[in-house]
Amino acid sequence: MVILAGGILFIMILIAVKRNHRLACISTLLIISAAIIAALLQIGEKPNAIGEIVVVDRFGIYYQVLLLSATFVISIFSYISLERFFPNKRKEEYYLLIMLATLGACMMAISTHFISFFVSLELLTISLYTLIAYYRERAKSIEAGLKYLVLAAMSSAFLLFGMALVYAISGTLSFIGLSAITPPLNSSGALMLIAGIGLMIVGIGFKLALVPFHMWAPDVYEGASSPVSAFIASVSKGSIVAILLRLFMMADLYRYEKVMLAFIIIAILSMLIGNLLALMQNNVKRILAYSSIAHLGYLLVAFIAGKGMGMEAATFYITIYMVTVIGAFGIITVISPADQEAGEIENYKGLFWRKPFLAALFTIFLLSLAGIPLTAGFMGKYFLLTAGLGKTEWPLAFVLVVSSVIGLFYYLRVIVTMMKPDENSASSTSLFLGSSLGGILVLTFLGLLVVSLGIYPGWLIEMVRSLNP
Amino acid sequence: MILAWLIIVLMGCGLLAWVAGRWNNTLPRIISLAGVGIQLFVVVWLWLIHQQGNVSGRWITSYTHSWIPSFGIQIKFGVDGLSLLMLALTSFLGILSVLASWKEIKHRVGFFHFNLLFVLAGITGVFLSLDLFLFYFSWEVMLIPMYFLISIWGNENKVYAAYKFFLFTQASGLLMFLSILGLYLVHGQHTGVYTFDYEQLLGTVMAPQTAFLLMLGFVIAFIVKLSTVPFHSWLPDAHTQAPTAGSVILAGLLLKTGAYGLIRFVLPLFPQASHQFAPVAMILGVISILYGAKLAFAQTDLKRLIAYISVSHMGFILLGIYAFNQMAMQGVVMQMVVHGVSTGALFIIAGALHERIHTRDIGQMGGLWRKMPKMGAIGLIFVMASLGLPGLGNFVAEILILIGSFSDNKALTVIATIGLVAATIYSLRIMQKVFYGKEQKHWIVADFGFREMGIMISLSVVIIWLGLFPASVLNLAKSALISLSEITNKQAQAKPDGNNRKYPVPNHSVVGMTVIRENSLNNQINPKAQIKNDRTGY
């Protein structure tokens, strides 16, 4: 943590002294690796709590390492993307922002108190406003940034109000303290508590882009550059999942049936609407946005299943989802021509014959998102279903199955498009820049990870099982 | 270990073929041929071991390796007579489909063979798996490459057909996955042992209603694969649009995985529920037989016509499986093999015709015998096979199924027999329209070449051999089928609350045909049926 925070200062000074994109990127990567190592060194130690504010336990460290690694990979893609789309502009501040956002995300993973939760969330969100609008010459980018700003501020207000209501009833802001509260018998107190939690669900639901708080996602994904979209889909959502699991587990909010009912409805809506709306999209980034809505809906199935298996399944799933979605956005970054990002599905026509290797990797990522065997997504979905069925959540599991069949349609559509013969292949090969080696190496690694987790997920399952918040 | 290698070799050769395809178009073909050849070799070797009779226990050989221990998932392969027979069919048709696409596929040869070998690997996995998770895994593995085969190398309407194929099978497969998970959890809650191991899951105690629901999940997946009416509509599209090799594998192997699943998993795992479901399944089977036959008669597209023949023939399989007696079951196994061979041959002929005259419309053919006497003669053999001419394999299969199911349900069997008459009509129509009659257009075509004759002669030899010496196949599967039905019956009886239908081993039911008597020594029929048999004076 300290390394990350210190690193941010270091980069800031570095930029003041000498502006060099490559230098900024490399030092960012070094700082992140140092932070990962520092986190890994703590893994054997006992849970280390600082008051009621934060606790550094295995669960927190796992998520921190996960989020940091994700940022590491995204930074590499960002370098490619910035070099290509933003050649003569200031690029170095981007790394400051992305590290600030990661700092927020990592803090969130270890928060056990509403104050630390809110502070880290704001740190993450405010950095994101700027990141989304970073390509300031593009109208869509600015639009996306503003949209996110307005709506995120709104949702933060909801979250705060929810916290205030909970505080008014319980008199405590720590998660543990909340678990000791039994709602008073008189109905108004209980009602206020539920309302408070409900408002918090609105805030969290917004950040996770769950239906019905999902409206921003497609526009923001489309407007932001691919690495930033990957960041929103992976790091931002991953950290919120971490805090959600911790909040519900520590404060034992599973007690309140009405809250869980709300989550069941949100999960069903997210799965169905996310997948159905994705069917109508013609832009791959929008498709991925809607698919991420659906995937978070899947994840809620495990979350609703509760402690133990449910927590493990959710953690496993978000890990796999992060790997896959970063890979998918990475492909978009790497194959994009210089003038414009390869968003439209038409850009992918014939990719399989132009760039067979990248197309094969993209196919692997898409199949993993669709949950087809031999890829990690299948194992994730298996874990979710087992968790759901273990708690006899049959309707949820059934909706999951039905909606993932719907989901297949649009993943297959992208794959089929890639395989269509390209009529004007001669002109378009020159249109596409030679892909950078570093990006391809990272993508290969991610692809291998997805396949190997799909074939042999044992080690990750064991690791996830050993976490206990 | 040899079983795991079967799959690894196929997948490895697939990857190799893809890579090799970048430099050369012939290399991938040779690599795939070698890969499937190795499989055939191993299968023959296992068969020889089996023939010598020094096999102890249920499995000829098996292989277990832990995979994801925390969920009780393991890699468990086992091969008995039934799976060995299916493997033999897989590798035989696998070699033929590589050969059949030798000239047909000219683009992206490497990737084509990659997909082909991965389909075969998935199918091999399905026939070998003894762990339900692994089974579902293989079940899904074979879909994606098949989807690619149809959607890249298919005919004019390929994308639609590929979608339809994929969504039908995937949706039904996921239902099966829910059932597998349900079974896993029910078993775990009862015994405290959470496992996907097939042999341990046999005999899971559960409420009849749960069993029925779980069984439905499996059954839907399998009868969609089996293309039973009303779930058949993916099949004509997929078969018609797929390239020749794809059609051969679809008809010859993929459909059989459904039948195999019913025999290997549904009946032993849910004996009681299967008995409840039997009347419905048999009715669906009969409807498929007749409806498929009727639609086959109405088609003008040759490949579509053959596809509907498959629907009709698969109806016999469903009828036979749910007749619950040994004779019908042996007929089913026979039907699985002969249908693979005969329909595969018909598809190769249709593919060869399409390659030559670029149409599948039988209205534009006619009088082709004079141009292509070799193709005509071979065509005649397989058309006769599919209408069930005695002396060819299909006859044995269908007659066994019909006799077997007659003892279980007279009325339905009688109706099903009409299917044989219908088969004669649609089969002869193929001959008439394609090879005889007036020439519609003056095609300039070459007859079968050396490679194609090689394919066709090996298929013809097999179908005639199966017709004359069916015992060789039936003996192989017999012990496996008997042990499966013993499991089924034991569990049906073990149910204390179940109805008291017992399935004693009768003294030899008297059957008039020597071939059948030889193979029905362990025939098990229920008492009711036996009385029927006696009365009808068999």
Image (spheres, coloured by chain):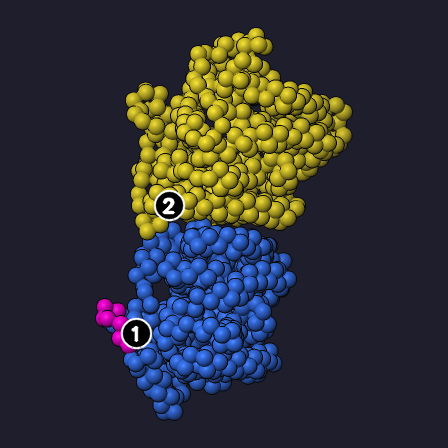
Chain colours: A blue, B yellow
Residue type pointed to by label 1:
Val
Who is closer to the viewer here, B372 or B485? B485
Which chain does the numbered disc 1 sit on? Answer: A
What residue sits 46% from the left and 62% below the top?
Answer: A304
The local crowd at label 1, few if under 14, some if 14 to 19, many if 20 or more residues have their Cα within 10 Å, is many
Q: Which mark is residue A56?
A: 1
Image coordinates of residue A218 in percent, x first then y, are: 58, 70
User: Is residue A21 placed above or below B440 in the rendered structure?
Assistant: below
Q: Which amino acid does label 2 sit on?
A: Gly
Residue B180 in percent (x, y) is at 45, 44
**Secondary structure type for disc 2:** helix
Q: From the image, tell me which residue sits under label 2.
A: B188
Tell which subunit mark 2 falls on.
Answer: B
Q: Tell me the element at label 1.
A: strand
Depth check, front residue: B437 or A303: A303
The quadrant where residue B269 appears: top left
User: Which of labels 1 and 2 is toward the front?
Assistant: 2
Which of the image's four quarters has the C terminus of chain A?
bottom left
Determine if the magenta segment contains residue A246: no
Segment colored magenta:
A43-49
